[in-house]
Image (spheres, rainbow, N blue to C red):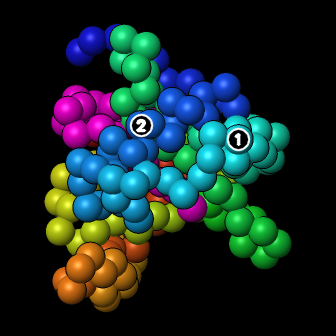
């Protein structure tokens, strides 16, 4: 595998992140947005990344290949009685699927969560996205429920799996 650098996204990466998300949104229907990308200006994205950097239980990592942002993953901690939980998101550009980048991002996110005292990671994934479900299961995520018709694209509905990783126990995983 070529050299991949995983590092925290910082405010100065806002423009790169917006471009990467537009690209991934145009390449797949697995994300909450399409080719229009994120509904944020560069300044709004800078503020978001600054807030993520400063907030406990929140982090946003990027994956760079040859100085190009090709993937990203984030954790968003939850408040109050749910502060032991974090929501997770992950996206990789299509040309880099099945190259290990998603796993590298997952390892960093899981490591961050453990260090931050987060006990559970939660995510939603399209029920027909077998590759992503396989990746998450490989890292110990379990399916805990289903959201029927969670996405509506045009006139078609898509179910989503809710998956959780319990960090209170060490999973026996063969990566």
The residue at which mark 1 appears reads as: 43
The residue at which mark 2 appears reads as: 20
Tell me which residue sits at (24%, 54%) in the image: 28
SS state under label 2: helix
Is 82 contained in the magenta span?
no
SS state under label 1: helix
Q: Which residues are magenta?
A: 87-105
Tell me which residue sits at (33%, 41%) in the image: 23
Are there few (<14), some (14-19), or many (20+) residues within 10 Å of tag 1?
few
Instruction: Compare marks 2 and 1 and give the one earlier in the sequence.
Output: 2
- Taking the image as shown, residue 107 lies to the left or right of residue 117, namely left
Instruction: Determine if residue 162 is in view.
Output: yes
Seen in the picture, residue 120 relative to 57 is either above or below; the reply is: below
User: Residue 59: image x %, image y %?
Assistant: 65, 42
Q: Nearer the viewer, residue 24 or 80?
A: 24
User: Residue 111: image x %, image y %?
Assistant: 57, 37
Tell me which residue sits at (23%, 15%) in the image: 1
């Amino acid at each position: 595998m070529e050299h991949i650098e995983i590092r925290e996204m910082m405010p100065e990466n806002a423009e790169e992140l917006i471009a990467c998300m537009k690209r991934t949104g145009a390449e797949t229907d697995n994300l909450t947005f399409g080719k229009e990308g994120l509904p944020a200006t560069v300044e709004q994205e800078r503020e978001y990344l600054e807030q993520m950097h400063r907030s406990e239980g929140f982090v946003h990592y990027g994956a760079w290949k040859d100085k190009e942002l090709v993937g990203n993953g984030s954790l968003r901690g939850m408040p109050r009685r749910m502060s032991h939980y974090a929501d997770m998101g992950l996206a990789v550009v299509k040309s880099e699927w099945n190259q290990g980048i998603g796993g590298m991002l997952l390892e960093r996110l899981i490591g961050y969560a453990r260090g931050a005292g987060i006990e559970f990671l939660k995510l939603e994934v399209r029920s027909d996205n077998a590759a992503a479900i396989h990746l998450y299961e490989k890292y110990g995520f379990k399916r805990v429920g289903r959201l029927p018709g969670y996405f509506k694209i045009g006139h078609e509905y898509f179910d989503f799996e809710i998956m959780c990783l319990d960090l209170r126990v060490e999973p026996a995983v063969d990566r």
